[in-house]
């Protein structure tokens, strides 16, 4: 459920739906919660070198598109976003 994103303490919370698929519901960073406004896409990816599988989600948070990767073990990390300033502590 948790992991890091570019040096930030980050937790991604997921919800398991009735079909068994988990989708991100919120990000927690800098002591604040950021609800996922929308899941834009989900893709299952196989790393050809390691044989590991990942779920890659494109989500909308604070009006920005954020790409999150979740490993089979449940660790999450932010792969990319045009602007992650909303995750910084206030002040």
Image (cartoon, helix red, strand yellow):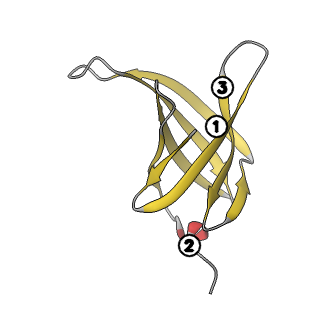
- Dot 1, how many residues are within 10 Å of its Cα: few (below 14), some (14-19), or many (20+)? few
- Dot 2, how many residues are within 10 Å of its Cα: few (below 14), some (14-19), or many (20+)? few
Which residue was labeled with disc 3?
22
- Residue 71, quarter of the rendered image: top left
Mark with earlier residue (2, 1): 1
- Cα gap from disc 2 to disc 3, whole angstroms: 26 Å
Report x, y in % for residue 59: 62, 43
Quadrant including the N terminus: top right
Mark with earlier residue (2, 3): 3
- Residue 30, quarter of the rendered image: bottom right
Q: Which mark is residue 88?
A: 2
Left or right of 83? Residue 91 is: right
Left or right of 39? Residue 4 is: left
Which residue was labeled with disc 1?
40
Left or right of 20? Residue 9 is: left
Task: Say which element carries label 2.
Answer: loop
- Looking at the picture, tell me which residue is in the foreground, 91 or 64: 91
Q: Residue at x 47, y 62 (%)?
A: 8
Q: Which mark is residue 71?
A: none
Report x, y in % for residue 83: 51, 65
Task: Say which element carries label 3.
Answer: strand
- Cα gap from disc 3 to disc 1, whole angstroms: 14 Å
Q: How many marks?
A: 3
- Cα gap from disc 2 to disc 1, whole angstroms: 23 Å
Point out the residue furthest to the right here.
18
Report x, y in % for residue 28: 64, 56
Task: Say which element carries label 1.
Answer: strand
Q: Residue at x 79, y 15 (%)?
A: 18
Report x, y in % for residue 76: 49, 41
């Amino acid at each position: 459920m948790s992991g890091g994103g570019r040096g930030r303490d980050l937790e991604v919370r997921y919800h398991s739906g009735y079909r068994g698929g988990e989708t991100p519901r919120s990000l927690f960073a800098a002591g604040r919660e950021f609800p996922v406004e929308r899941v834009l896409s989900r893709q299952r990816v196989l790393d050809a070198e390691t044989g590991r599988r990942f779920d890659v989600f494109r989500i909308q948070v604070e009006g920005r598109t954020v790409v999150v990767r979740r490993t089979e073990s449940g660790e999450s990390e932010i792969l990319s976003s045009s602007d992650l300033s909303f995750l910084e502590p206030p002040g």
